[in-house]
Image: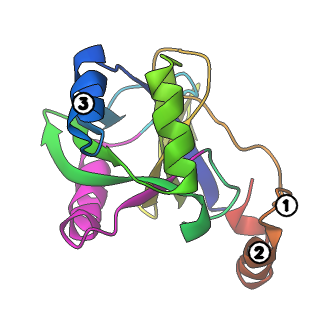
Amino acid sequence: MEKLILTEYYTLDIDDQIIKEAAESNSPLILKDKILQKSGVKNANGRIYPANLLMREMKKYSELVNERRALGELDHPDSPVVELKSVSHIVTEIHDDDGVIRGDIEILNTPQGDILRNLIKQRIKIGISSRGIGSLQKEGDTDIVQDDFELIAFDAVSTPSTPGAYLVNESKVPTDVYSGLRNIVYEILGDKYFL
């Protein structure tokens, strides 16, 4: 089966009090207990992530969280690589809440993190979206994410607020301004890892 970059979207509900407290105390902006991903539920893409698969990937991702390496980017790249120059936030806690993956997100003091923080302060609706690679198997009108799925990151994205999730990346070849590293990754991994 062909492995694809899979992305899913959830809206981040932001509490004005948290923004105010972070600004007044000059402390990091931390978004507590946010939905990051859901298992066993058909999303807007017609895709289902089996619970055992998502729990396995959450446990692996927890290692990155514990090592303070669970970085996310501002917007989805067309790559299975998290680029440090695009990092805006870090997931500092992750847990399962009956098939719903929840976590804490700290907005970083990076150029992209500053953009994200300012968008949040201006009450722009921001989403969190998982990024991973894996294959799909069609069952009726539903795509089942297969056991080869690997969770890469949770990225901050700007998308219409829709229930569930939907596909963001549709290009076959990375085309953004950070194409150098992505082109190398593309040459190594080939077409099968890119939509």
Can residue 120 be seen here? The reply is yes
Query: Earlier along the polypeptide chain: callout 2 or callout 3?
Result: 3
Query: Earlier along the polypeptide chain: callout 3 or callout 1?
Result: 3
Rendered residue at 64%/56% (across/down) = 4
Q: CA gap, disc 3 to disc 1?
A: 44 Å
The residue stretch that appears in magenta: 49-74
Q: Secondary structure at mark 2?
A: helix
Does 20 appear in magenta? no
Question: Residue 61: x, y in percent?
Answer: 29, 63
Q: Mark 2 and 1 residues: CB-CB less than 8 Å, in contact?
A: yes
Badge 3 is on which residue?
24
Report the side of 134 relative to 186 (left or right): left
Rendered residue at 73%/60% (across/down) = 194
Label ID, residue 29: none
Label ID, residue 173: 1
* Residue in front for this viewpoint, 25 or 189: 25
Label ID, residue 186: 2
Q: Nearer the viewer, mark 3 or mark 1?
A: 3
Density class for disc 1 (Cα within 10 Å; few <14, some 14-19, many ≥20) is some
Identify which amino acid the numbered label 2 is placed on: Tyr
